[in-house]
Amino acid sequence: MAIDIKPRWAWAGHAVRTVRGQDLIARLERENPSGGIPGAIVRAEAQIAAPSASTGRVWTPYRGGVFIHHAGPRSFTPQSDDDCLQHIGDIWHDHYPKFGGDIAYNFIVCQHGNIFTGRGYQRGEANGGDAPATPNTRQGEVWVPGEGAVGRNAGFYSVLGLIREQNSPTLAMLDAMKRLIGHLRGPDVSPARKAGPHIFPHRHGDNTVCPGNLTPYAQNGSRIDPGGSPAAPTVSIVPRAQWGARPPRTVTRVELADRTGFAVHYSAGPHTQSVRAIQNYHMDGRDWPDIGYNFLVDRAGRVYEGRGWTSVGAHATGYNTSHIGVCFIGSDGDATPHAKAAIRALYYRARHLSGKALIATYHGAIGSTACPGADLRTWVIGGMAAADIPIGGGDGGGPATGLTGETSVRSITAQQRAVNFLGHQPPLELDGSFGPLTESGVKWAQRKIGVDPDGMWGPATEAAYGRWTDGERLELDGNFGPATIAATQRAIGVTPDGSFGPESKRAFQRHLNTWASAGLVIDGSTGPATVKALQRHLNAMIRAGLDLDGSWGPGTTRALQSALNQEKF
C-alpha cells in the first residue's frame, strides 16, 4: 500500500525551539564550541531527526496491533501545517524527560491528514506501561483474544491523532489513520514488525479518557479499520534483538553444508513461557553460553531466532553440530496446526539453505528422552504434514553474536533517568555527570534488577533492566501475598488468582521437576523437600545464596520475587 509518511526531519526544526531543544543546543555547543551556536543548532536538529534506536526491549507488535491516542485536554485548532509541526515539537519536549529522551508515539496523524514519524517501527512507550494489573494481566499488559496477556507497549504500535479532548477528528485524519494501519499490517512492513489485527483506544484497560472523541473509531470494524492484510500468509522469524535476547558468552560456528539433520523438541513447560525465560534457564540454570535451540516456535506459528542457522546448538548431545534443533514452546498436545506449519516451513528452509535433503527426526530418536511428547513424535514420524507456508521477511538477524540491540550502552543522563525510574531516593540529578552519586545509584539499580553491582551500565545491566521493566515489577518485600502468588502462577502456567491452593502447588512442583530436575513427588505439598528444591533453583538461576534449609521464609520469598522480576524462574 503506497503511503506518504513524513520523516522526523519534518518536525525536528520545531522541537529545537522548545526549552528542551534549547538545552540540547547549549550542551552540544559546550561539547564542541568550534561551530558556535549555529553549528550546535544544526547538530541538535540532526540528533532529534535521527531515526529512533532500538531499546533492546521486547517488541512484538504482531501479537497485538495499534492503540489510538489523542493529545490531551483542552482544544487544538491549527491554522496551518506549521502549527501541527510545532505541536509535535512541543510533545517531544514534554516526553523527553519521561521516555528516554524521545517522543513516545510511533506515528502522529494531524487534522490535515498528514502522517509523521515518531519512533516509527521501533517500540514506543505511550500505551500505558503502568496500566493497572487485572486477574489475568500484569501491570502494563492487556488481554488480547487468541494471545492472552500482551504488553501494551511491547505488543502494540501507538498512533496519536493530533486533536485534543474538545476537538473532533476530521475526515482527513480518519482516512489517514486507515491508510497507516493498513500499511502497518501490510506487506511493506517486515513480518517481525507487522501490526497485529487489533485496534484499541488508549483507555482500554487504563485509567484515562484518551483518546477522547477518537474513542468510537478506535475499534475493529470502524472507519479506520482497513480490514485484513492482502498479503499471502508467510512464516516470520523474530530476530534475537526483537525478543530481548541476551548476548551469548561464546559462539561456535558450523557451515550449513555440514548439517545433516533437523531435530524437533518441546520445552515441556507452559505454552505462555517466553523465549527469554527459556534462555535465562539455559544460561543461568545450566550455565550454557546461550539458549540451546537454533529456533523456537510458539502456538501461533511464530518462529524465534535462537542460535540461528550457522551456530552449534545445545539441544541433543552428539547431534548439536550435525542437526538444527527446533523447539516448540509448550507441552505434549499443545502444538497447533499453525505451530506445525511453522516447523515444517523451517525444515524446508533448512533444506534449501543447506542445499541437500536433511533427516527429519525428533529428540527422543537421538537421545534418551520423552521429548517432544507423543503428539509431535507421531507427527514427525508421519512426515510432518502441515500447510505449506514459506518463510517470509528474511532468515533472522544472522548468527548469534553479542551485537544485539540490547547491548547498546546508555548515556549517563539515560542511566540517571533509569535509576530514578526504578525508585532511587533521593532522585539523581539529570546532569549527565558520572560522579559518586550516580555511580552509587547505578550500583543500587543493579542490585535491584539482579546483576553484578559493578557500577558500569553495560550490556548485562541493559538486558536486566529491560527484563525488569517488562516483567512482574514485584516489590522485594519478602511477602508471599496475592501479587507474588499471581506472578508465580503466571510463571508455572496456572490461573493467576492469587491463591496458592493445591492445584498451584502441584504445578509448582512440576515446574521445579522440569526446570530444576528436582525429582519431587507431585503431592501438592510445599514441605521441606519442595522448599529445598526451590532454594536450590533460585541459587542456580539468580545466585541467591540461600541456605538449603527447607524453610520458606522472607529471604526465600525475596529471592523468588527477584527471579520472577527477571523472568528467571
Image (cartoon, rainbow, N blue to C red):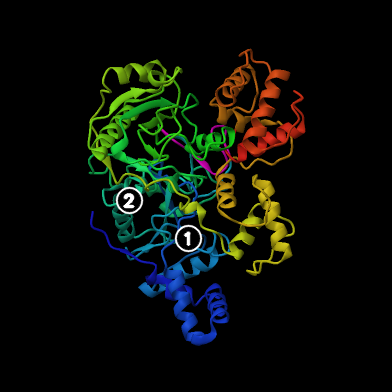
Q: Nearer the viewer, residue 267 or 424?
A: 267
Residue found at x 76% / y 33%: 554
Residue found at x 31% / y 36%: 258
Q: Quadrant of the C terminus?
A: top right
> Which amino acid type is marked by label 1?
Ala
Distance between mark 1 and mark 2 Cα atoms = 22 Å
Question: Is 46 located above or below residue 478 in the figure?
Answer: below
Q: Which residue is mark 1?
A: 71
Question: Is 366 located above or below residue 413 in the figure?
Answer: above
Residue found at x 36% / y 40%: 254
| Residue 337 visible here | yes
Q: Where's residue 359, x and y in %?
A: 29, 26
Residue found at x 53% / y 36%: 288
Marking on residue 498: none
Q: Where's residue 29, x and y in %?
A: 54, 81
> Which amino acid type is marked by label 2?
Leu
The main secondary structure of the magenta stretch is: loop
Dot 1 or dot 2: first in sequence order is 1
Q: Which residues are magenta?
A: 133-147
Q: Nearer the viewer, residue 237 or 70?
A: 237
Residue 213 position by quadrant: bottom left
Circle 2: element type: helix
Question: How many neighbours does mark 1 have within 10 angstroms: few (below 14), some (14-19), or many (20 or more)?
Answer: many
Question: Is 542 located above or below residue 2 in the figure?
Answer: above
| Residue 210 visible here | no
Q: Which residue is mark 2?
A: 184
Q: Nearer the viewer, residue 191 or 395?
A: 395
Side of 478 relative to 319 (left or right): right
Side of 426 relative to 335 (left or right): right
Mark nearest the camera among 1 and 2 is: 2
Answer whether residue 88 is magenta in the image: no
Q: Where's residue 271, x and y in %?
A: 46, 28
